[in-house]
Image: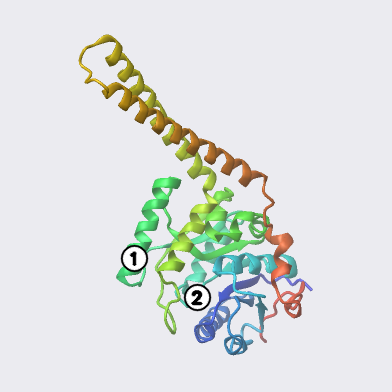
Amino acid sequence: MKTDRISIVVCIPVFNDAKSAALLLEQLDSVAAALPHDFAVVFVDDGSRHEEFAALPGPTPHIPAVEVLRLRRNLGHQRAIAIGLSFIAAETDADYAVVMDGDGEDCPSSLLELLAAAEASPHSAVFAERLKRHDGAGFMVGYRTFRLLHKLFVGRDVKVGNFSVLPRPVLERIVGVSEIWNHYAAGVFHARIPVVQVPIARGRRLAGESKMNLPSLVMHGICALSVWSDVIVSRLFVIVGGLTAVVVTALAAVVAIRLFTTAAIPGWATFTAGMLLIGGLLLAIVSLLLAVFVLGNRSAANFLPHRDWRDYVLPECLGSLSRRAPTAAG
């Protein structure tokens, strides 16, 4: 039964990182001990090896409800988050859903600030705005390149990751946003859900090495940009339109020079006009392909997290928290 105490369910995607998950849960237990709330944790096991899955931690003194959703296959952190949030919305009475990475870089102690902001803004998603990172030089070069491209193509900077708190009304909206299947934070912003950003420094990984290599970083960036495909295509349309105007103007200038002056070198006008026509044809083809892409994307059947998440979870994991509010330890 639902109690008068505020209930918080934490969604943590994990992939072959049980040691970090155990250390993170210890820190979360200390936070839970300091708050008069009911806490539960849902680990979304993203297709880990069996020994890693079996090593995921269980209940703690102040977090008696610790559940594991085991996915049928590895889907990636973003899709694991979408499934975890859908599970929390469908199977629990949580007042707040929290999303954290499982490596400890999202500091549990910072959760207090995010929860305070969520209580003050019950109809907004609250995200941690990254102030400082502790990554290697190679990662930072790639990350800053991604931020530059995102700013160029989308028109907004990237300042948040996964660490966030969602009040129940916002959670119910977000699990109906198909874009979070590709990228959680980008999907929230693209859906124009109100967002509050709280400046918080990143922590350090608790154990092991980061699994974010160059290919996964590139794919992560592509997924984030794909959410904004309509905005990117619109900007490309403007660029193509501008280039088409330049081609038409240049072609008119070539014709004018050929017909009304003697300055043109023999054969020059024909060659230049031919090149401009080829350029114009290529731009027309690009415009057509962009139009087909946008129309096809709009008519395609979308994945809806709240409708389709169960297909990706092993049956024995379903309903383990079913409408049961997490209870605090005595």
Q: Nearer the viewer, residue 223 or 244?
A: 244
Amino acid at dot 2: Pro
Callout 2 secondary element: helix
- Asked if residue 214 can be seen in this view, the reply is yes
Number of labels in the image equals 2
**What percent of the width, then of the height, locates residue 172?**
68, 58
Q: Nearer the viewer, residue 191 or 246?
A: 246
Callout 1 secondary element: helix
Q: Is residue 6 above or below residue 152?
A: below
**What percent of the width, then of the height, locates residue 297?**
61, 46
Residue at the image position 48 percent from the left and 33 percent from the top: 284
**What percent of the width, then of the height, locates residue 119?**
58, 61
Which residue is the extreme one toward the front? 267
User: Where is residue 167, by image quadrant?
Assistant: bottom right
- Asked if residue 93 can be seen in this view, the reply is no
Amino acid at dot 1: Met
Task: Categorize mark 2 by other alpha carbons within 10 Å: few (<14), some (14-19), many (20+).
Answer: many
Residue at the image position 30 percent from the left and 69 percent from the top: 137
Report the Cα–Cα distance between label 2 and label 1: 24 Å
Q: Are marks 2 and 1 in contact (CB under 8 Å)?
A: no
Disc 2 or 1, which lies upstream in sequence?
2
Residue at the image position 67 percent from the left and 80 percent from the top: 67
Q: Is residue 81 above or below residue 285?
A: below
- The scheme the figure's colours follow is rainbow
Quarter of the image with the N terminus in it = bottom right
Residue bearing mark 1? 140
Task: Categorize mark 1 by other alpha carbons within 10 Å: few (<14), some (14-19), many (20+).
Answer: few
Residue bearing mark 2? 108
